[in-house]
Amino acid sequence: MKKLIVFALLFSFIGVQAQEINYSDHFTPQTLRIDYNRCGMADSEEVFFEQMRKEGKWSGPRQNLIDPFQWGEYRVEVYDAKSDKLIYSRGYAGLYSEWQATAEAKKIKRCFYETVLIPFPKNKVRLELYSRDRTTKLNKVFEYPIDPNDYFIKTEKGPRLKSYMVHDSGDPKDKVDVVFLPDGFTDKEMNLFREAAKEFSDALFKTDPFDAHEDDFNIWVVEAPSKESGTDIPGKNIWKETVMNTSFYTFDSERYLMTHDIKSVRDVAANAPYDLIIILVNTKKYGGGGVYNYYGTFSAFNPKSIGVWLHEFGHNFTWLADEYYTSDVSFSDFIDTKYEPLQPNVTTLVKFDTKWKKMLKQGTPIPTPRTPEYDGILGAFEGGLYSGKDIYSPMQKCKMNWLDDPFCPVCRQTIIDMIYYYTR
């Protein structure tokens, strides 16, 4: 009952926000893409404007224009220029914040190309970009005035590619739209991509809680052939010319399969309405990755790929944190444990009352021992977010820790909350 009350309160808040902002008062049916570069080092950050581009139909929420979730390392906010009223916001993440936690970021400066999407405004607006510091506070790092009549807003269509739905549940504005993109599939291998996309899509709807929400999703496919088959594997001196330039060894982690070429990713994805981008890579090598409200990338043909896909979808769709704490990763000192992390499935116990504490059975010890006695019990188990100390996870087994396990109740409810954000 407590969980249902929390859930109801969250969406009553969303409802109040939706009543204040009418989509048609401020936005057209189209999408505006803003491209920029985020540059700096481990302890610095600057944003430099690149371009704007008008794209197709806006498929994001039209009722819930103000993001109620305090998720993502970054946040975009849009203000009406005349009234100074906040009319759109959304949290997201990117590779730059992850790179800042690597050893390289302490030695050299780098730039990461990034993009954000907003509904195309009817009138002049002000775009603001925010970034979180070590205390989780949002700080404004960029501001830009946007005139929808600006003739520098690009309107060319970009690459025109074949796209179609493989799972149709209705109008994109009321659904979660997932688009599958291929990388490293040549024109002759496109049938392999289609088969892989269907396998990944079917697996999603066989997994709790997505199985009960199949009608809330649309699945799209865009066929974008690459010149060469496969993907980059720098550690083996393998380099392939592919449409979205995916690569293993991201941040020198062999299994981290990602791309820095978000511009090409967005150009390909623009051929379909989408909320979430999933890139399937033509390789059997184990690997993948997912970035919140940005994109996910997966090996299409490894035996463990489906498990990786479902785990990483937890990152990509919501801001679920990794709960493992013994694997080798490229990050060090990922968060400051003096503060409560904002990811919904980990806690430092600093503000545990704001997390899943109300869902615990009375008498559950906090911290909860990692012993067989507490297998399958919701608690606060030390270990998570790449650290074995001072960070706690909801259960000893969860898909955000072990690929073969189901999502724990905390992660499952988080996913449902996000589905309703898009569809209710």
Image (cartoon, rainbow, N blue to C red):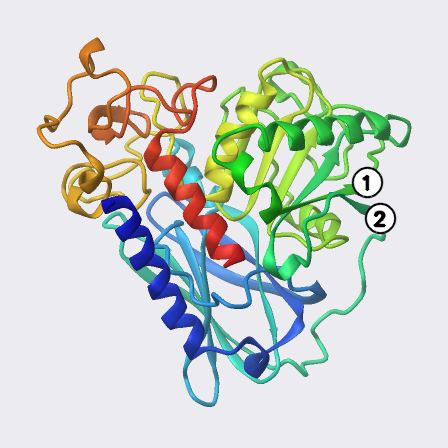
Q: Position of residue 219 (x, y in %)?
A: 69, 43
Task: Please tell me which residue is depicted at 68% across the width and 15% down the height of the picture.
Answer: 284
On the question of residue 84 being in view, the answer is: yes
Label 1 crowd bin: few (<14), some (14–19), many (20+), radius 10 Å: many
208 sits to left or right of 394:
right
Task: Please tell me which residue is depicted at 78% across the width and 26% down the height of the picture.
Answer: 195
Residue 349 versus residue 146: which sits nearer the camera?
Answer: 349
The quarter holding residue 56 reads bottom right
- Residue on which disc 1 sits: 223
Q: What element carries label 2?
A: loop
Q: Residue furthest front?
A: 1
Amino acid carrying mark 1 in the image: Glu
Badge 2 vs badge 1, beta-carbon distance below 8 Å: yes
- Residue on which disc 2 sits: 161
Q: Which residue lies furthest to the right in this view?
A: 188
Residue 204 versus residue 74: which sits nearer the camera?
Answer: 204
264 sits to left or right of 307:
right
The vertical placement of 393 against 117, above or below, is: above
Amino acid carrying mark 2 in the image: Leu
Which of the marked residues, 2 or 1, is nearer the chain's N terminus? 2
Q: Is mark 1 on a helix, strand or loop?
A: strand
Task: Please tell me which residue is depicted at 65% across the width and 64% down the height of the picture.
Answer: 58
The vertical placement of 219 against 76, above or below, is: above
Residue 261 versus residue 420: which sits nearer the camera?
Answer: 420
The vertical placement of 203 against 146, above or below, is: above
Q: Residue 171 carries which label?
A: none
Q: Position of residue 376 (x, y in %)?
A: 28, 19
Residue 353 versus residue 295: which sits nearer the camera?
Answer: 353
Q: Which residue lies furthest to the top in this view?
A: 372
